[in-house]
Image (cartoon, rainbow, N blue to C red):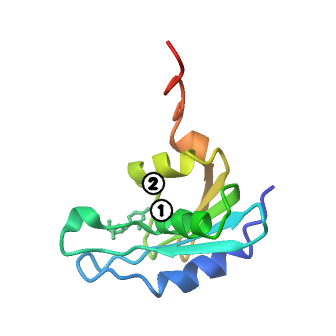
Amino acid sequence: MTDFSALIPAAWEVRDLAYAPYSKFHVGAALLGSDGVIYRGCNVENLSFGLTICAERNAVASAVAAGCRSFSALVVVADTREPISPCGACRQVMAEFGDFPVLMVTKEISEETSIRALLPRARTGILDSA
Ligand code: THU
């Protein structure tokens, strides 16, 4: 069983820093590095909507910039009725760094999944020599 307990408050905390003036939808992510450090990310929107960076990708970028490329858990939080799940772009970016457990959390409920379950066959065959 993965211990997500330190990640949950960290994800709620960073959610408060979300820059989401367009959607008003605030998301927080906390990523546990295998170095034991919790890397945080919130969504950062842009007037050019497609440039928006999700909370999950921000957490990954923060970890990589600190020298951490291996992860043991992710928590993503939003104040919704159903847990939100990472978008397709974030799934692909996280799958770059392997498989790890993911907990999707609301104020009421949480649901566990994994990177592999969210994005099966993310790496199969790509760049294999012919
Ligand atoms: N968003 C995230 O940050 N993570 C998710 O898992 C889903 C969506 C952000 C992107 C955008 O700023 C807002 O939520 C609405 O889609």
The one nearer the camera, 41 or 69, is 69
Classed neighbour count for the residue bearing mark 2: other residues with Cα under 10 Å, few (<14), some (14–19), many (≥20): many
Where is residue 78 drawn, in percent x and y? 47, 73
Q: Does the rendering let one see residue 61?
A: yes
Identified at 45% across, 86% down, the residue is 17
Taking depth in this image into account, of 81 and 62 the one nearest to the observer is 62
Q: Quadrant of the N terminus?
A: bottom right
| Residue at numbered disc 1 | 57
Q: Residue at x 30, y 80 (%)?
A: 24
Q: Verify CB contact (< 8 Å) between mark 1 and mark 2.
A: yes
Mark 2 C-beta closer than 8 Å to ligand 1:
yes
x then y, percent, for residue 53: 37, 67
Looking at the image, which residue is at 31% across and 67% down?
A: 52
Callout 1: few (<14), some (14-19), or many (20+) C-alpha neighbours within 10 Å?
many
Q: Quadrant of residue 128?
A: top right
Q: Is residue 17 left or right of residue 68?
A: left
Q: Quadrant of residue 62?
A: bottom right
Marker disc for residue 44? none
Place of residue 99 in the rendered image (x, y in percent of width and height, measured from the top left): 65, 45
Residue type of the residue flagged with mark 1: Arg
Q: Eyeballing the image, is 27 above or below 99?
A: below
* Element carrying mark 2: helix
Q: Which residue is mark 2?
A: 90
Disc 1 is placed on an element classified as helix
Q: Amino acid at mark 2?
A: Cys
Q: Check the image and report above or below for 83 versus 20.
A: above
Residue at 63% from the left image edge and 62% from the top image edge: 74
Label 1 beta carbon within 8 A of ligand 1: yes
Count of residue discs: 2
